[in-house]
Image: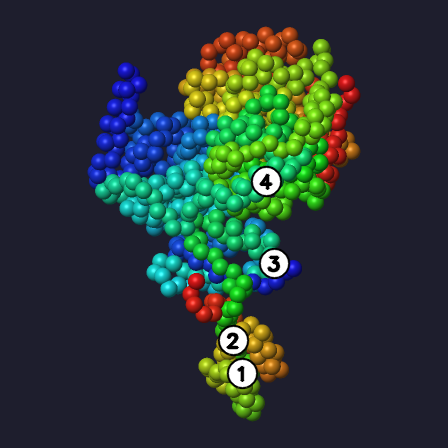
Amino acid sequence: MSAQNAILSRDGLREKLLRPDYITGSEILLRSLLLEGVDCVFGYPGGAVLYIYDAMHGNKDFRHLLTRHEQGAIHAADGYARSTGKVGVCIATSGPGATNLVTGIATAYMDSVPLVVITGNVATAAIGTDAFQEADITGITMPITKHSYLVRRVEDLARIIREAFHIASTGRKGPVLIDIPKDVSAQKTTFHYPETVQIRGYNPTVYPNRLQVERLLSAIEESERPVILAGGGVVYSGAHEELLEFVNKTQIPVTTTLLGLGGFPSGHPLWMGMPGMHGTYAANKALQNCDLLISIGARFDDRVTMRLDGFAPKAKIAHIDIDPAEIGKNVETAIPCVGDVKAVLALANEKARPAKSAAWIAEIDANKRAYPLKYKDDDKELKPQYVIEMIHETTGGDAIVTTDVGQHQMWVAQFYKFNRPRSLITSGGLGTMGFGFPSAIGAQIGNPDRLVVSINGDGGMQMCAQELAICAINNIPVKIVVINNQVLGMVRQWQEIIYDNRYSHIDLAGSPDFVKLAEAYGVKGLRATNKEEARSAWQEALSTPGPVLIDFVVRKEENVYPMVTQGNTLDEMLMGDDE
Amino acid sequence: MKKKHAISVLVNNQPGVLQRVSGLFGRRGFNIDSITVGESEEPGLSRMIIVTTGDDRMMEQVQKQLYKLIDVIKVVDLSAGPMVARELALIKIGAEPSVRPEILGIVETFRASVVDIGPSTLIVQVVGDPEKIDAMVELLKPYGLRELTRTGVTAMTRGLAK
């Protein structure tokens, strides 16, 4: 009953929004965003977007979340997009507002996240004059956007917004920037929202070439040592069910990249864990010894392949990807399947038959048993891996987990066992510190009924800590975890192993007291320094409604293992401490 | 094996499109030997002819990466088949009246033309493939090369369109 009312009122709203009124560019923007189904925009006002913010005033249909920094806004929009699959939207003013978005745009671009980024600019007549708060943001962001627009006429605005959403959310997804000069946001025109999009130079290939899919299937039937490398593309195309069916039919062991985690259930007997620099022994060995490697929505990143000329030396490579430019970019590919991962797998599943993989699976199972992920637990000192395991156990692997970048990110990838797609929100390609916490805010806004846990290091937590205010003021109930080792842990690990214990500028001692910091913002703060405290603090956090920050003070010298150092092949792993 | 390629890129005639294309070459490590841009047979579209050097794998990446730009409509590697490639050069040389007949002899042989005569200089205009222009420049050098400007190669495939 109430759901039906909601639909009726949404239809009513749509009709109201589509009316061909004579309105300003700012009103066109808000109406267009609502018509695209945007339910929250993350932003920060300033001079060049004042008309836009003026149009928001008193507009009850439009929801805007004011962050405390533009970087917080775009990471939140990113977390919203990754966790919901919808397009994330953020708004910033010209000049510094726009340049503060740059890291967030690059983060989204590297991980193929659909964003529409709105920036204000100085009035068209002032463009190019070094006007106050002027920056050539379309020029600055050209290498890190899928496409960008500088709107010169208000008559073009509605079409451009329609195109931007289409481009951002189809094909290989990515951020699209719309730069709106101040005068354009004030000028009026008759509103018309185009129903269809026609962009001559943009026609992503969705459906694969049948012949290539058949070649793939016969290669599988002949293969004795096949491996699937599943990446973010599986998650982004919503192909997790198709992948599961494909694996069950073909009996091929699966390794999931950092962005692919959750795209395949961790509990599945054919799952080998993550590959790469901090991948599992079983996954890395399997990649190096396989005779057929099927990459599905993964792009052979250097953190996955490690030394490229020694990567998967015996394998015939098949590559399923929506982006034709990824095929053959890093590794030579025998069987290219260009298309949407979901469409390719659905087609393949029609005729998929098992590989001759029984002995190979037994070999991999033996590796899994002999070399599981492990760490040396301690009853006195709290271990970061213990904290992650505890969070996994208590949430049943069903929370949305966002991470920052560094050791804690790798421990989450190793010790939190993801079962559902869109559950891990992490900056993989760009490796952006400061991403973990604000992205959780966006994920929570997009998933109000799910538990969102943001896991950060003490370094990254200080890169966007100002957004604690947003959680407190809006009662956004993110559980904020700080894995606090008082050091830039991943840099410390590299300096220990590769730079001969020459520790240079990594000491974070003297950082603020995170409990007090949280409380200063009005967020509940808790601290734990051993296992017992950790369990009770975490339970308290889970049972407290609203946002809570938990400062887990952990051992400083802990390293992430296995580790493949740069210049080595995947099977040259450092396995770390005994036991 | 590395080879010179002339690529024809049909693009939307939009502000910033040259920046998008040249920026792509720059950041992906593809070199640009020359680039020419002008209107095409279709209103609203421009055609770029980019000369670049690379092996087959790089050329495949160049094409695929270009297609990822929304403003790029069509990419053709002209070097894959028979094509006509032409460049125009203006060459200003020192030419006292006494040596002019000699220079005019070279100009005639190359089917070039003199487009400006100053008190002690000549401007020679020559059209042809890049090798012909190189040869012309070499021959005129002894007279004192004052200024040289070349358009870069423009090109199209021979015979029927498409």
Please determine whether, in this image, residue A540 is positioned above or below residue A107. above
Estimate the spatial distance between the alpha carbons at disc 1 and disc 2, rounded to whole Å: 9 Å
Q: Earlier in the sequence, mark 1 or mark 2?
A: 1
Q: Position of residue A95 (x, y in %)?
A: 44, 41
Circles 1, 2 touching at the beta carbon (< 8 Å): yes
Q: Which mark is residue B128?
A: 2
Element assignment for label 3: strand
Q: Residues within 10 Å of mark 1 (few under 14, many from 20)?
A: some
Q: Chain of mark 2?
A: B
Amino acid carrying label 3: it is Gly
- Single out the mark in the foreground, 3 or 1: 3
**Camera-side residue: A491 or A109?**
A109
Task: Look at mark 1 in the image and give the residue it sits on.
Answer: B110
Estimate the spatial distance between the alpha carbons at disc 3 and disc 1, rounded to whole Å: 31 Å
Q: Which mark is residue B54?
A: 3
Q: Quadrant of the N terminus of chain A?
A: top left
Q: Which mark is residue A191?
A: none
Q: Chain of mark 3?
A: B
Element assignment for label 4: helix
